[in-house]
Amino acid sequence: MSLGKGDAQKNLESMEMLAKGPKGAKGEQGTQGERGERGLSRIQGRAVVVLFLISALLGGGSLLWTAHAISGNNRKFCDVITSIAPVARPADPRADPSREAAYEEYERFARLGRSLGC
């Protein structure tokens, strides 16, 4: 069998036969008529399922703990925001720009508190 010489179709078919191996008869089940073997044993299959469940439970627990920690931080932040003394808007912002800046900062905190539901 010399590749590269002769009919291209025959060369292609012979290369396919080398790659695939001999073709069995249609419906052939194996050498002794048995069905194919499982890829994993039963205990290995169960181990894969258990490991998947463990990782899913840990991932879900992590999400729940994160949500709990964030809501706790929001409550602490609400306590801080509500304890801030209100700042009155200055009558003439040009006369005292520092009071205007303090008022704007207070307004930002108040808006943030309202958005968090404080």
Image (cartoon, rainbow, N blue to C red):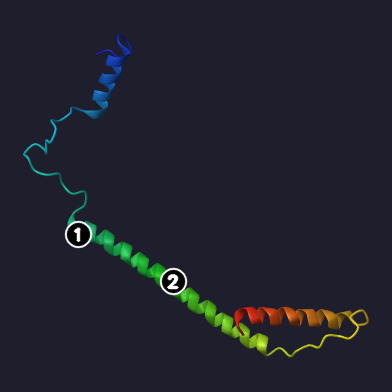
**Could you tell me which secondary element the residue under label 1 belongs to?**
helix
> Which residue is identified by label 1?
43
Is 6 located above or below residue 26 in the figure? above
| Rendered location of residue 108, percent (x, y) | 73, 78
Q: Could you say where residue 52 lies in the image, as x and y percent from the top left?
A: 32, 62
| Residue farthest along the left direction in this orientation | 32
Determine the image quadrant of residue 34.
Answer: top left
Name the residue at 88% across, 79% down.
97
Task: Judge whether 23 appears above or below 52 on screen.
Answer: above
For the residue marked with disc 1, what is the amino acid?
Ile
The residue drawn where x is 36% and y is 65% is 55
Instruction: Tell me which label, 1 or 2, sits earlier in the chain.
Output: 1
- As drawn, is 78 to the left or to the right of 34? right
Of badges 1 and 2, the one in the foreground is 2
**In the displayed image of the protein, which residue is found farthest to the top?**
6
What residue sits 74% from the left and 90% below the top?
85
Type of amino acid under label 2: Ser
The location of residue 12, given as percent across then percent down, is 30, 19
Among the 4 quarters of the image, the one containing residue 24: top left
36 to 91, vertically: above or below: above
Quadrant for the C terminus in the image:
bottom right
Residue 90: quadrant of the picture:
bottom right
Measuring from the top left, give residue 115's x and y in whole percent. 63, 78
Disc 1 packing (10 Å; few <14; some 14–19; many ≥20)? few
